[in-house]
Amino acid sequence: MNLMRWAGSAALLLSAGMLANCSQIFGSGEAEGGITTAMLVGADGDSANWISHGRTYSEQRYSPLDAVNRETVGDLGLAWFADMDTARGQEATPLVIDGKLYLTTAWSKVKAFDAATGKPLWEYDPKVPGETAVKACCDVVNRGMAAWGDKLFFGTLDGRLIALDRETGKVAWEKVTVDQSKSYTITGAPRVIDGKVIIGNGGAEFGVRGFVAAYDADDGEQLWKFYTVPEGGDPKDAPAYLQKAAETWNMDVLGANDAIGGGGTVWDSMAYDPELDLLYIGVGNGSPWNRAYRSPGKDGTGEGDNLYLSSIVAIRPSTGEYVWHYQTTPGETWDFTATQHIMLADMDIDGKRRKVLMQAPKNGFFYVIDRETGKFISAKPYVTVNWATGIDPKTGRPIENPETRVDKTGKPALVTPGALGGHNWHPMAYSPSENLVYIPAFEAGMLYAPEADWKPDTARGFNVGFNLGAGDVPADEGFRKQVAGSLKGMLVAWDPVAQKARWTVEHPGPWNGGLLATGGGLVFQGTTGSEFNAYDAATGKKLWSFAAQTGVVAPPVTYTVNGEQYIAVLAGWGGAYALSVDGDLIKRKAPVRNISRLLVFKLGGKATLPPEPALAELPLDPPPSTASPQVIALGQAKYGRYCAVCHAPGAVGSTVLPDLRRAGSLESAQAWAAVVHGGMLKDNGMASFASSLSKEEIEAIRAYVIARANEDKALESGRKIARR
């Protein structure tokens, strides 16, 4: 389909009043030779292509295509596949424009294919330095691109925004958008509004100050920057919205150390309403998590709402001007981000047509908010929640359970949801025919143990103010089975008006993939259990399944080429859960490894995947544990802060990164130090920790891993072993 012809027909789909409004907002909004404002605003009328991250500015991830439907989906087969050259987590949403498919992969690489045949067209590698991996909380992933004119735009893990020529893949321009001396990263997809490329970043766990910024699509010039938290010190010269925020912080502490930047990074979700001319951004967690260290009160416990953490904020995309905000978790202390998928829709509520914004953030409540004003409409829990008993309907604030407010008590607390949330980055989908929002939900609590006398570290490791080693799963088979059984991944069909689930499907694995809803009455989703499934959108009945050979966490898209419908999804296990949760717990639920591929399906597809390789694992054969209990305890504490985020608590590694219990370097203190202190493997993502850990502490970590490996070896052989 020729996009220029499509631009004319799409404009006809818009009402005269809407077009007039767009003209006032955007001017001409033209980008000669490619994607224009009219195309992006009218994307819902273009079922052939997928030209923006959520398909439309409303981010509903719904396509009216219906050739693949309840009756025909049984004939869906693999049309083609393409192997990726990155064996890490794959989370991207492809774009499809004029029969060509474009995607980003792990390590911020870009690839282009013929969307019907899979023929490679071009590829681009921004050559992100390997040591950047230690700045990323949740794998070296990338979630996608934006299109405008004849260019594609994407962010790199090391904080660059790059524009590529869509036809050739050649660099048009690139811009460093962050202070690269700090632990900023980019994993989210940008959006383009009237030629302005809008991108946020991540890094709150490491101490940065969050912001979102806009850049000119033609040359990369920065047009505006919107900070989400105030800067430390006297706020009198700050914009009014930041002066208001400063009233909710301890400004003497904020910014006093480079590792207390406040956080509030805008690392994923955005949505846009062209009629209201409002861009909605989701704001992340505090830095550090523990409010008692981030914003202490007079008695040393945490105080203040700490705006605009864990908030949805509406701004003007032309200027970055603040309009309104709604905070989902005031004074957040549990890593309860509001960066999860933001979705817009118009629906009847209490007999009145409302323009609503919907979100299922980490904190476990599903929110419906008036997107014109930011006023609270309703919220109910979509997963098990114990940190709050509900949301006050008058104030829109949570009714907190004081026993879980760990920054006040100083005592450990088991909180649900945990830091991975009731819903993480994985996109939801909405079916207008069913009036259901489909949520990739997750059940798992977390033990939050405040770290005594915590001090920030500007160089390496999580700056969260909690002891991340406190929740180590002991070497007890019965206990591990019990913990594994408590982890659930679910597909929840949520009625946003009634605020309740209509149906729920529990998955074999605890993590699960992003979603696509279609006019064929289907919902598509991947699972940890290495499946890609189609469900009946009305009932949740599984109608079709494909053995993907790897966990599928990325969201699918659908498009047509020459009138034939295709479904595409990027497969490849990885991300936060795969790295940061006890690997043995994953294996007990559903053994999974990374085989990174793009999978593309059509009715009657006959392609087949190569035979699935065996999941090989080295035996546990560690050296004897001879260190003292004091040294092992020191190693456990340092491991929890500096190592657990990538190599999992308890040193029980995943199938994505090396399981340290099986590392050959355990045999030699010199070999271990060459990696951890000397940075011998920095190009593979394992940077030196010499600036944060002494040689004695590095050796103590080795002693702890050896002790853990011996415990688990004894567990496997049926023996019991006690630490010295």
Image (cartoon, rainbow, N blue to C red):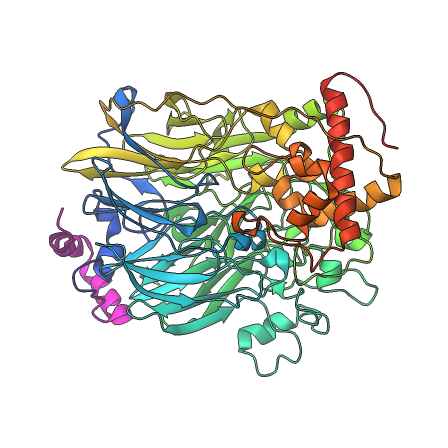
Query: Range of the magenta residues?
Result: 1-30
Q: At which x and y percent is residue 605?
A: 24, 24
Q: Nearer the viewer, residue 697 or 434?
A: 697
Instruction: Name the residue furthest top.
Output: 718
Residue 600 drawn in magenta:
no
Quick check: 413 above or below 200? above
Quick check: 604 above or below 628? above
Q: At which x and y percent is residue 387?
A: 69, 44
Q: Quadrant of residue 513?
A: top left
Q: Nearer the viewer, residue 681 or 454?
A: 681
Q: At which x and y percent is residue 143?
A: 42, 48
Instruction: Name the residue furthest left.
Output: 5
Instruction: Report the residue at 18% width, 61% height from top.
Output: 16
Quick check: 509 above or below 44? above
Q: Main secondary structure of the magenta part?
A: helix
For the C terminus, the image quarter is: top right
Residue 342 showing in the rendered view:
yes
